[in-house]
Amino acid sequence: MSSAVGPGSTHLVVKVHPNAGKDVLIGQGPGRFEAWVKAKPMQGDANDAVERLLAHGLGITRGQLKLVKGRGGRLKIFRVIA
């Protein structure tokens, strides 16, 4: 699901594995990623870790990412704003 949704924005799908041994981001195809994060899925800690990891991997700021779906699940959709 790497589809343009408007001028300067794209959706990315991320499958998350919280409570992992290390922080790793792997591309699984256009607009699809898999992320392993050390953070536990409590109080949004894993979501924050995934956002930091994704932003770093894409070379953008966290402010350019917005979690639009999947706040409480392992499958998350982020919008990237140029």
Image (spheres, helix red, strand yellow):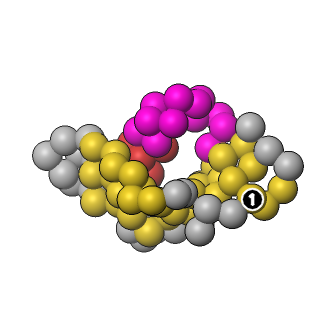
Q: Within the magenta stretch, is there residue 4?
A: no
Residue furthest to the right in view is 7
Q: Position of residue 62 (x, y in %)?
A: 58, 34
Q: Position of residue 30 (x, y in %)?
A: 52, 57
Q: Secondary structure at mark 1?
A: strand
The image shows residue 67, relative to residue 60, as above or below, that is below
* Residue 8 figure quarter: top right
Q: Is residue 6 left or right of residue 37?
A: right
Q: Specify the principal SS of the magenta part.
A: helix
Q: Position of residue 76 (x, y in %)?
A: 50, 64
Q: Is residue 81 above or below residue 78?
A: above
- Quick check: can you spot residue 22? yes
Which quadrant of the view contains residue 33? Answer: bottom left
- Quadrant (top left/top right/bottom left/bottom right) for the N terminus: bottom right
Quadrant hosting residue 31:
bottom right
Instruction: Give the residue displayed 46% in from the left and 42% down from the top.
Output: 54
Residue in front for this viewpoint, 21 or 4:
4
Q: Residue at image x 46%, y 31%?
A: 56
Task: Residue 48: tell me if it is visible.
Answer: no
Q: In percent of the image, x 78 and y 61: which residue is there?
A: 5
Mark 1 residue type: Ala
- Position of 69 compared to 57: left or right? right
Classed neighbour count for the residue bearing mark 1: other residues with Cα under 10 Å, few (<14), some (14–19), many (≥20): few
Which residue matches tag 1?
4
- The image quadrant where one finds the C terminus is top right
Query: What residue is rendered at 21% in x and 53% in y?
Result: 19
* 46 relative position to 4: left or right: left
Magenta residues, start to end? 53-65
Residue 4 in percent (x, y) is at 74, 59
